[in-house]
Image: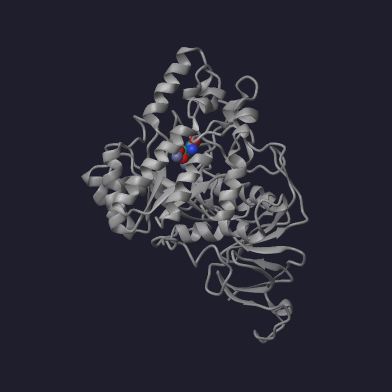
Amino acid sequence: MSTTFIHGGIVVSATGSQPLDVLIEDETIAAVVRPGSTALGADLAATAATVIDATGKYVIPGGVDGHTHMQLPFGGTEASDTFETGTRAAAWGGTTTIVDFAVQKPGERVQDSLALWHEKAAGKCAVDYGFHQIVGSVDGESLEGMRELVSEGVTSFKLFMAYPGVFYSDDGQILRAMQTAGDLGAVLMMHAENGIAIDVLVEQALSRGETAPYHHGVTRPWQMEEEATHRAIMLAHLTGAPLYIVHVSAKQALEQIAEARGKGQNVFGETCPQYLYLSLEENLGAPGFEGAKWVCSTPLRARAEGHQDELWRYIRTGDVTTVATDHCPFCMKDQKELGLGDFSKIPNGIGGVEHRMDLMFQGVKDGRISLEKWVEVCCTAPARMFGLYPRKGVISPGADADVVIYDPDGHTSIGLGRTHHMNMDHSAYEGFEIDGHVDTVLSRGRVLVDAGQYLGSAGHGRFVKRGLSQNLI
Ligand code: URP
Ligand code: ZN
Ligand code: ZN
């Protein structure tokens, strides 16, 4: 048996922070004890095979990113991170579990699309991974497929109210999928934007010669997100399906979510660091074609409209349940460039799997959220949301030994050539300075990152069969 002893640090959980030492045996947390405790019988600092001095540091559960897209075929190309490069970058940033999306194309069985995603990921990942299933064509066969997938540990399904002709489902299809999800107790994840109306706005903008990346944001106004969010909530209410609205960027959509939650409905909101830090004016509106780096949907919102303050507030109230990255990287060269002269052809997505823990810790430093809220939205709540708890998302006996030692007095300067391990030719957060640092990362007891060195390997990460959500009211 291999033992690791982490001592001297402050263990931070979603509910509190205290000085505690952590004993790991092989892949599992064996004990969490008060410093100096003799309960374990031996001087572990002298006898454990690996001893980590965490004095002055936070000891937190490994991050759980509930929304990533490695190798996603999208927008005429494929997301530039493979499962190998993307999960290695995740490890660098203190994320030890991702939940990625298998994609069912029309005409394909959901079971076959899941098998394909298993093939892409198996033997490649640096950290543990699970899958959600995107249902690209809702029909009798795919509804039956959803039942089978739940028994295989894929317990959440994403539908799109956006992207007509690609992933789009109409209201009847959504209703049917929600009925099935409600029946199964599975989480229905929704991309909530009115894609039919957006396509009209896009066509009108292009016909006026408004072709720059900035117009991606302008043609997807908050009304499109609020309306779709409301519609999804109503359909979920009718069917009893637990509803998780992904990548929420508009404060008005969050008002809808908060109202439904206030009435006791199982509705959950996810936001992403890009919506908390980046904006329509400064990023999508950058000169020339530069704004393409930040084309994603839902889009970055106008800073002047006050969405960011409200998103942070809704994180504090709990109406934003989780913070994920929606990591969907595309290079500028040959990928984002597909939309030169026509913003609607820019592949949608931003890469950030490496930076979520740091960017959210900056929220602690800036007084936006508490230390415990940081751990809650980045680790514990996503684990509970997606049926991974208490194996993931918590430091307690019996849990997987996924642990991050975080230095609150360290510094991280985000940018290409500095802290960038994602397979992208730019960073969406170039120049961001973070008042903290991921020092050491363990996944199931194995040290993946320590003192600026990568010690992990492709294939260490395993598929995790998920249970049903543990977040339901
Ligand atoms: O722009 C985005 N969000 N790209 C990834 C696909 C999705 O809708 O989540
Ligand atoms: Zn989406
Ligand atoms: Zn996504």
Q: Position of residue 344 (x, y in %)?
A: 47, 23
Q: Where is residue 34 in the image (x, y as percent from the top left)?
A: 69, 78
Task: Return the residue found at the far left.
Answer: 140
Vertically, is 212 above or below 259?
above
Q: Position of residue 218 (x, y in %)?
A: 52, 25
Say which quarter of the image contains residue 56. Answer: bottom right
Residue 435 placement, left or right of 288: right
Say which quarter of the image contains residue 470. Answer: bottom left
Please tell me how many numbered marks the rendered image carries: 0
Q: Nearer the viewer, residue 224 or 119?
A: 224
x 37%, y 56%: residue: 155
Q: Nearer the viewer, residue 386 or 337?
A: 386
Asked whether residue 28 is in view, the answer is: yes
Q: Which of 201 and 32 is in front in this view?
A: 201
Q: Position of residue 285 (x, y in %)?
A: 62, 25
- Quadrant housing the C terminus: bottom left
- Write down which quadrant ligand 2 falls in: top left
x 57%, y 27%: residue: 292
Vertically, is 165 above or below 377?
above
- Quadrant housing the N terminus: bottom right
Picture colour scheme: one colour
